[in-house]
Amino acid sequence: MSDSLKQRFLQYIHTHHLVQKGNKTLLAVSGGADSVLLCELFYQSGLTFGIAHCNFQLREKDADEDADFVKRYAQEKEIPFHVIRFNTEKEALNHKLSIEETARNLRYTWFEKIRKEHGYHFIATAHHKNDNAETLLFNLFRGTGIHGLHGIQPKREKIIRPLLFLSKAEILNYFKTNNLLFREDKTNKQSDYTRNFIRNKVIPLTESRFPHLIENLNNNIQRFNEAEILYNKALQSEINQLIEKKEEEIYIPIRKLLKCTPLSTIAFELFKNYHFSYEQSQQIIALADSPSGKVIKSSTHQLLKDRNWYIISPIASKHKQHILIAEEDKKVMTEDLKLLLSQNTLKDNFIPKNENIAILDYNKIDFPLVLRRWRKGDYFYPLGMQKKKKLSRFFIDKKYTLNQKENKWILTSGQKIIWIVGTRIDDRFKITKHTKKILEITAIKK
């Protein structure tokens, strides 16, 4: 091995603080040129390391021969060797994921297991400049925003990439010059997978017009990294001024959000934190002039438009202060309350003398309903009255203690209160001689 290559390798490790003296590193080795060179550099530099090889059983005999090649390499150099076989196709089917994503999940989960069990400080992969360029293009085509343009980082938690200073051409030239062996994965020549398509089709075609493409893209990655640092600082400052946290819920003042510039970008970055897509972030902006009660859901959270606020809460939480009730819901639970809902045809005008049961005119109600805590400024029309009354005054008249007021739930339809739960319904939603269908709600305190 040339001293210049080893020196560049050690300088890159030092510059990015990848490995310290005394560290043990677990190298992910497939048997390809990239990972074998990674082993050579660690070995020639006197660094302490072990080798981990995954057999994904996707290429039958070739996969087994790869495993044998890596095993022999480790034995010849007396390097600790770890190997595993995965039924990747079965795992992909079970988890309904692509082969690519499944293989990635399997190997990194196993690498981390081996790292902890055998006391390795880091896991090293053999990603290089071409991989970095491919990742940049892949993320650019997918539309990941500025966060996807920083490419592959030299270090992320326990994962390090010590070969990002080398191009694929430099790696192959080293093997040619030194007449060393490595395993060639024939599937890399196929373009079925997205990354292979970029590697085999997009980059060669683009390089025919821009010969220094790989170097230029890697230079851009460095600039994107620095731009992202400034971007994140400015962005976080904007977001901190927008969000108000109340237990598990996030409150965002709508009018304040709409004054932000650039609105589209800030909204995307803000709502992305709760797994809303870019398209959903634009839908959320459009909700500003919609009636209260409108809802948008991500995979983990729901956003409720409530008067002058967007309220974000975890879908799975039982401690939300705003709970949506769909038309088909039969039961709703909070930490201190259970509501039972049923829809019935009105057969007579019997109204139960039980404050924990509300009988409402179904046709006057718009779904979804919102169950929430009361707040200052709320008002309703108490049953039997044609005049509105603030809840704060109503509670004083009822001689409620501060604790009783704070723990009071109300049920709303749009912007209208239909029931102070367990106390009084709103006169506008009472049943009349014209009522055909009712919504019956029973409140059970825990």
Image: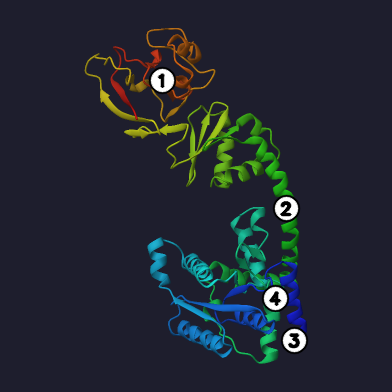
Q: CA distance from mark 4 to mark 2?
A: 26 Å
- At x 66% / y 92%, what residue is drawn? 179
> Which label sits on residue 266?
none
Badge nearest the viewer, 4 or 3? 3
Given contact means CB atoms under 8 Å apart, are the residues at marks 3 and 2 in contact?
Answer: no
Q: What separation in Å lies between label 1 and label 4 (alpha carbons)?
A: 67 Å
| Residue drawn where x is 28% and y is 14% of the image | 353
Marks 1/3: CA–CA distance = 80 Å
Q: Measure the alpha-carbon separation of dots 4 and 3.
A: 16 Å
Q: CA distance from mark 3 to mark 2?
A: 36 Å
For the residues bearing labels 4 and 3, Cβ distance under 8 angstroms:
no
Q: Is residue 385 above or below residue 99?
A: above
- 149 relative to 74, above or below: above
Q: Which residue is mark 4?
A: 167
Mark 1 or mark 3, whichever is nearer to me: 3
Question: Is label 4 in a helix, a strand or a loop?
Answer: loop
Element carrying mark 1: strand
**Earlier-in-chain disc, 2 versus 1:** 2
For label 2, the residue is: 229
The residue labelled by disc 3 is 2
Q: How is the structure coloured here?
A: rainbow
**Relative side of 233 to 383, left or right:** right
Relative side of 17 to 402, left or right? right
Name the image quarter holding residue 58. bottom left
